[in-house]
Image (spheres, rainbow, N blue to C red):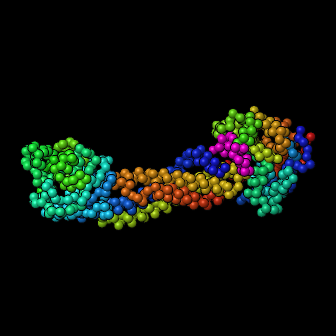
Amino acid sequence: MIRDYCFRSITQNRTRTVLVVAGIALGAMLLTTVSALSGDMSRLLVGPLSRWYGGSLLVLGPGTTFGRLPSGHIGLRLEDPAVFSPVDLNRVTPELEHPVAGFFYLDAVYTGDGHRVTVLARDVQFSGPHALRTRRGEPFPAGETGRVVMVNAGQDQYPVGALVQLHLPTLREVAGDRLLFDYGRPEPLAFTVIGHYQSPMALPGPLFIMPLATFREVTGVPPGSYMGVMAPVYDLQEAARVRGVLGDYRVMDAQALTASVVAGARFRESGGGFMAVSGIFAGVIILVSCLAMANTNLVVLGQRRLELGIMRSLGWKRHKLRHLLALECFILGGLGGALGYVLACVIIQQVLGRFGGSIWDLPGLGLQYGLGITVAAGVASVLSVLYAIFRAARVRPAEAIKGA
Amino acid sequence: MHKKASIPALQCLGVSRVFRTPDGEVTAVNRVSLSVQVGEFVCLMGPSGSGKTTLLYCLSGLDLPDAGVVMVAGKLFYDAAQRSRFGEDHLAESRMACLGFVFQTYHLLGSLTATENVMVPIRLTGTGRKEARERARELLEEVDLSHRYDHFPHQLSGGEQQRVAVARALANRPRVLLADEPTGSLDFQNGLRVVRLLRELSNRHQTAVVMVTHIEGHREFADRLITMQAGELTAGGGETRC
């Protein structure tokens, strides 16, 4: 009986239901968003940005999807030390000692919108007939092992790993915009130069694109184990312009790169303050949400005085009315909480997407949180209106009906 | 027209209701005593402000008299001297079991269909949904609304809503039906139809009816006429008409 009436009341009084649910959803959404952004966002953003500034190698976890940073970068995530170990690329290119060197050599900025970044290989052996050389042309010491990963942007034709620097030892000839490589074949492998990179700390050189399969062949690295020697990020822009094939790749120029590094440092410095402000903001939202919920429910119950009076006149006892009202408040609160959670997820995804993250990187925002905030909103809704429920259930039929 | 019985369907003794206002006390009902027999149809008339509605509310337990006793079918329904014994929940339960009330402005629950409105008091007695639905539909058929089972109040005309309200009031086969100007919101023809219906149902179910009305024409349906003036009965309180 109570459930039946409760359901009818919620579905038939749509305007009231929508307004109450929307109000609660707004609070739940703000709370979830602020909580997530204050906690997980800082973890997602401050950490990587500070690492960028520090120049550590950035390694992607398998199967991670990335979006773009405002700077145009695809977001990066620090490696899971249990899976990958950072590599000091200065060992690969010993002459580079710039603090952001690693950033230039291995990152995921080559991915386009929605491309899935996957780690192809690790634990590459720097040895063998086609081993890569240092920039000085010296081979790496035999048996030297680096835990290097290469990322695939998800396009088989132009994988990121195909961007190879000119310093490969097998380069035979530069003919105009053609690079000819000799890998013991009758005909040299030819690749078109698509641009030139200019790095503040690396030697300038041309860029070209080769299919991933060819890259595997020319580097002589066994399948499933590849080394990526990446060009500076900002060269891709020119590459895209020249070839028109990387138009989807938004890359940053040197100025933007510098700006992002500076921003990263600032962001890291302001991280603590951001957390504190977010915490206060979340607290205010909780308080305001509870007050708003209480106020909304009070207004709604006030408007339902006649209805409650009629119900009393029909024989509803007080405890049944209390039960009914509490159930309604719980359901509306729960609906609001669930809706707020969904909206918050959408907003957070949008925000994180802009900063290169994904909502899937926020384990705290999972289904358990969703259920939690749904129940919490329901309970808060009931608690905030408990007094009003008790008062409403005590309505005297004659007063309510005559008053109407 | 009605059948006489030794035990009145409704009886009240010395019922008073006083409202306390900033300007002093207002006695809306002053020591009213009356008796209504089983199956009797009584019209309660009087000028506005004479206390008719307040008396009806006191008789039904919707309002609590400050003094007096109300008995339904020989059982004590309310005793102002033992106010603590007759809490509002107790009255609600008693009302549900033996009284029906029809309001002037129908007061159907807007979120429920006609059938569900009638089902409410039936289900409050613990009756199952299916049984309650069958009973509600029987009642709606009795008031000639079998084509409106699943209509919501806002989809019904005033006369139809009032007939649903009548069906709802009769849902638990009450001994007494109290109607507070049930035609007050209806045009003459629809009002007449409702009063005629109440009369028929009273005869059929042997339900005592006390109906507040302003319309002289309704007298012809009544077994007895009670008049009120300034909170007191001026005629018909203890008599029955054969």
Left or right: A297 as drawn, with respect to B168: left
The location of residue A163, given as percent across then percent down, is 19, 50
Closest to the observer, B187 or A268: A268
Closest to the observer, B238 or A9: A9
Residue B222 falls in image quadrant: top right
Tell whether position B126 is magenta.
yes
Closest to the observer, A110 or A340: A110
| Residue A195 seen | yes
The location of residue A170, given as percent across then percent down, is 11, 51
Residue A279 falls in image quadrant: bottom left
User: Which residue is located at x 28 percent, y 47 percent?
Assistant: A154
Left or right: A72 as drawn, with respect to B203: left
User: Which residue is located at x 69 percent, y 50 percent?
Assistant: A311
Image height check: is B161 above or below A232?
Answer: above
Closest to the observer, B146 or A61: A61
| Residue A267 seen | no
The location of residue B24, given as percent across then percent down, is 75, 59
User: Which residue is located at x 17 percent, y 61 percent?
Assistant: A92
Image height check: is B214 above or below A381?
Answer: above
Q: How many marks?
A: 0
Tell whether position B16 is magenta.
no
Residue B201 falls in image quadrant: top right
Image height check: is A180 above or below A383?
Answer: above
The location of residue A194, given as percent across then percent down, is 15, 45
- Per the rendered image, the range of residues in magenta is B105-132
Left or right: A44 as drawn, with respect to B59: left
User: Which residue is located at x 13 percent, y 58 percent?
Assistant: A133
